[in-house]
Image (cartoon, helix red, strand yellow):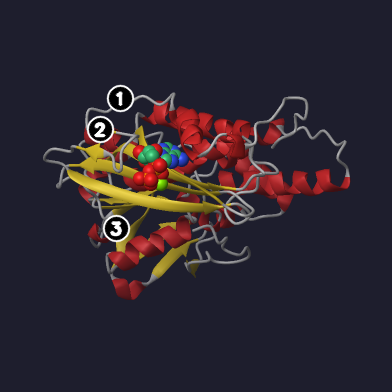
Amino acid sequence: MLEDKNIPKTPIATLGEFALIETLTKSFEIKDSSTQFGIGDDAAVIQHGKDETLVSTDLLIEGVHFDLSYMPLKHLGYKAVMVNLSDIYAMNAVATQITVSIAVSNRFPLEALEEFYLGIHLACKNYKVDLVGGDTTSSTKGLMISVTAIGKASKDEIAFRNGAKEGNLVVVTGDLGAAYMGLQVLEREKAVFQVNPQSQPDLSEYSYCIERQLKPESRVDIKALLKDLEVKPTAMIDVSDGLSSEILHLSKASKLGCQIYEDKIPVDPEVLKSCEEFKINSTTAALNGGEDYELLFTIEQSDFEKIKGHPHLSIIGHMTEVASGYNMVTGLGQQIELTAQGWNGIENKEND
Ligand code: ADP
Ligand code: MG
């Protein structure tokens, strides 16, 4: 992370807490009309009018959720915001504000934290959310990041996990498994680098997977897209821990079973190629991999025609009565039970 030893670094101890907060947050402007007051007092003030307010928080710990040996700090800042916005979008809501809290050790000079905040700044700009507060404290060793996202939606728009009905179609956005394969590539290169620091890997053939791991985007577009199609999702969840675990959450919350079809799970060609190389089943990568930040939702069967063939949406199955269980029909026509860990092979990563 701090490769360039020629650029002088500023120990954060020379700034003091207030100067540090001021330095990190001074370039953030308030843009959303619901933000009445942001950084600078004991609390931010938000006015959401008649809408419901949604709040979601996540905590990221160095060595558990991220590895700075291949994760640039700017990307980490961006990803930390994405992870949280994704939870708001998964309620079929609009994200409006975030707060960011950090615990840092003196291993991180000011310049490193500024890099991190550049990523946060870019995420706020791209996704039109205001940074309205946070907390800054010290830690003995690693970096800890907590982001809270705040959003809004009208009461009738909000999609909970428990709203699916028997016979509803199961839809997933984008494609799955790429972030997991990106992680495999990065872990392999890290191991190679430890043996031979001179190695200059050519990672261009994995660019999509690596980008999905290091610079994920969250599905800010889906709420408006569904509104345009005149489709109201009956239940929704984001795919942060792998399709298998998420569809189980949605099914159990809705007190239903589910049936999905392996052939229908959207997987990018680059994922197929890297899975072949790593001897990983691509369905396993999609089911168990995680960190895709796509949305999984259910719709009425009568909405089939509106969604059919949409480039961003794949219908992968349907909801069944609870007694039928949680199943996937494989490409060979075999029925396999879905578990939180997927259905074979790789371990579910502890990333929540
Ligand atoms: P308090 O003593 O009330 O906790 P702080 O001195 O921690 O207040 O924070 C002062 C202001 O700066 C508050 O508005 C707070 O939300 C904001 N703030 C503190 N740390 C951060 C941070 N890391 N990122 C963004 N805003 C922050
Ligand atoms: Mg504080």
The tag earlier along the polypeptide, 2 or 3, is: 2
Q: Under tag 1, what secondary structure?
A: loop
From mark 1 to mark 2, how far is it between C-alphas? 8 Å
Q: Camera-side residue: 119 or 140?
A: 140
Q: Is residue 54 visible?
A: yes
Q: Under tag 3, what secondary structure?
A: helix
Q: Camera-side residue: 139 or 314?
A: 139
Q: Nearer the viewer, mark 1 or mark 3?
A: 1
Q: Camera-side residue: 135 or 224?
A: 135
Q: x and y percent of residue 286 in the render?
A: 53, 52
Ligand 1 is found in the corner quadrant, namely: top left
In this rendering, the answer to whether 80 lies above or below 258 is: above
Q: Quadrant of residue 343?
A: bottom right
Q: x and y percent of residue 333 in the render?
A: 50, 62
The tag earlier along the polypeptide, 1 or 3, is: 1
From mark 1 to mark 3, how far is it between C-alphas? 31 Å
Amino acid type of the residue that numbered disc 1 sits on in the rendered structure: Lys
Amino acid type of the residue that numbered disc 3 sits on in the rendered structure: Arg
Question: Residue furthest toward the left?
Answer: 50
Disc 1 target residue: 31
How many dots with numbers? 3
Disc 2 target residue: 35
Q: Are marks 1 and 2 in contact (CB under 8 Å)?
A: yes
Q: x and y percent of residue 300 in the render?
A: 22, 50
Disc 3 target residue: 161
User: Which residue appears at 52% of the width and 52% of the height?
Assistant: 60
